[in-house]
Image (cartoon, rainbow, N blue to C red):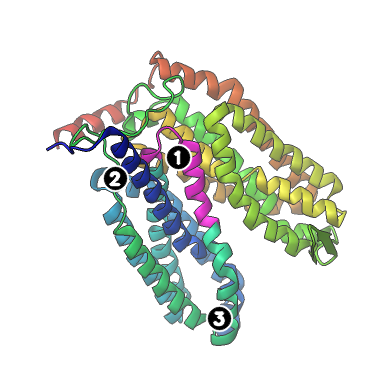
Amino acid sequence: MALNVPASDEKTSKKTIRWAQLLIAILCMSMIANLQYGWTLFVNPIHDKFHWSKAGIQVAFTIFVLAETWLVPLEGYLVDRFGPRPVVLMSGLLVGLSWVINAKANSLGLLYLAAALGGIGAGGVYGTCVGNALKWFPDRRGLAAGLTAMGFGAGSALTIVPIAAMIKASGYQATFLYFGIGQGLGLLVLGALLIRPPVEQSDGWGPFPAPDAKRSASQDYTPLKMLATPTFWVMYAMFVMMAAGGLMATAQLAPIAEDFHVAKIPVSLLGLTLPALTFALSLDRILNGVTRPFFGWVSDRIGRETTMFIAFGLEGMGIILLSQLGRDPVAFVILTGMVFFAWGEIYSLFPATCGESFGSRYATTNAGLLYTAKGTAALIVPFSSLLAASGGWAMVFWAAAILNIASAAIAVLVLKPMRARLRRGDVDVAPLEGAKLAEAAAKTL
């Protein structure tokens, strides 16, 4: 039965609903931010209580990252099939349970179990919210994905101080318990409000504004068909290179600051005076969040590959300048801010490019498959320590800069023409017989 409402009222209602869904997704992302960004506050208190090695404790974080990234495609498949609500509700239970277990853990095994459960839950929320944003905003994929990804950092920025204060006042176990319960309940409430966008012309509700036909896929690619395209693997390689390059330059920020002898030197900028390392880490939280919707918005207007070229090249130059000028504390703060600003946008540009290239119908699963590149990059990052040990930080900086500049060149010289051929439908899909058989079997189910 069609809704008998004026066209203008219907358009307003549709706009209101999709922006409300985006806001809910951002809030959901803020509920999982502490699982990654708040973890560092708990490491020393856990070590002080049980005297486990810090390396052993940090294995939990590695388990979390791998579970968060590598299971997103499966969680995305569940979203595409059953909708976002059940996946986020189940993820909320896992997120809450993980920190409750952390509060009670008296062995590394329990700590690792909690990390795995938290990673599965966080990945479920992350993949669902980014994929849902791509579906609700086919006309503004970059902005929507960027705002959603920004919630991942914003949630941490708002709660890091309360978490640190509670750890100091009540201990880390009570903090795990109460914040875990609060974050889990928050996801249960917010998840219940998530809905998938309409895709059929029913009850007067049609699809939302169409994307630019010059940029978007001519068809919806199933995950298996997408995996059979060379275009996907070029994007995957670029994602790995960018994630690894950025992580190699930023994960070692504290030891770099110490070796440059700038970590504790006060720096005054914008009316603030902080030690150089503290200032740089604070900028990380801010700029790494702001860059995601900013470059996403830019890419909606000038194109994904052009934006990649600008952002990736900017990071490469920032890393080179940091290696040359970073021993000055003011330059250290400014240039690390430049690197962070030019790095975080990968979490909006790549999902938007994926949705634009392979369609909206399977956007959550497809974006999840691409997101596993973060997990692949995490396995590469430890080699930065080996590079630093053998050749000093200069080798780490140059390796990261080369990865960034190479990705910038690939974006315009390789990816752009490949995506143009994909849109025209004249690209040959690699003959993966296993994929064809699997698709045929799936259709018979």
Hey, which quadrant is residue 101 in on the image? bottom left
Hey, which quadrant is residue 437 in on the image? top left
Describe residue 191's horizontal placement relative to residue 233 as left or right.
left
Pair 2/1: label in front: 2
User: 10 Å neighbourhood of mark 1: few (<14), some, or many (≥20)?
Assistant: many
- Mark 3 and mark 2: Cα distance apart in space: 37 Å
Q: Residue at x 46, y 35 (%)?
A: 140
Residue topped by disc 3: 166
Residue topped by disc 1: 370
Tell me if residue 267 comes above or below residue 10 in the rendering.
below
**Quick check: is 360 in the magenta stretch?**
no
Task: Provide the major secondary structure of the magenta segment.
Answer: helix
**Quick check: is 150 in the magenta stretch?**
yes
Q: Position of residue 102 (x, y in %)?
A: 45, 75
Q: Amino acid at mark 3?
A: Met
| Residue 445: numbered disc | none
Q: Position of residue 290 (x, y in %)?
A: 60, 49
Describe residue 190's horizontal placement relative to residue 290 as left or right.
left
Q: Amino acid at mark 2?
A: Arg
Q: Residue at x 60, y 40 (%)?
A: 242
Q: Amino acid at mark 1?
A: Leu
Residue topped by disc 2: 196
> Which badge, 3 or 2, is on the more N-terminal residue?
3
Whether residue 38 is visible: no
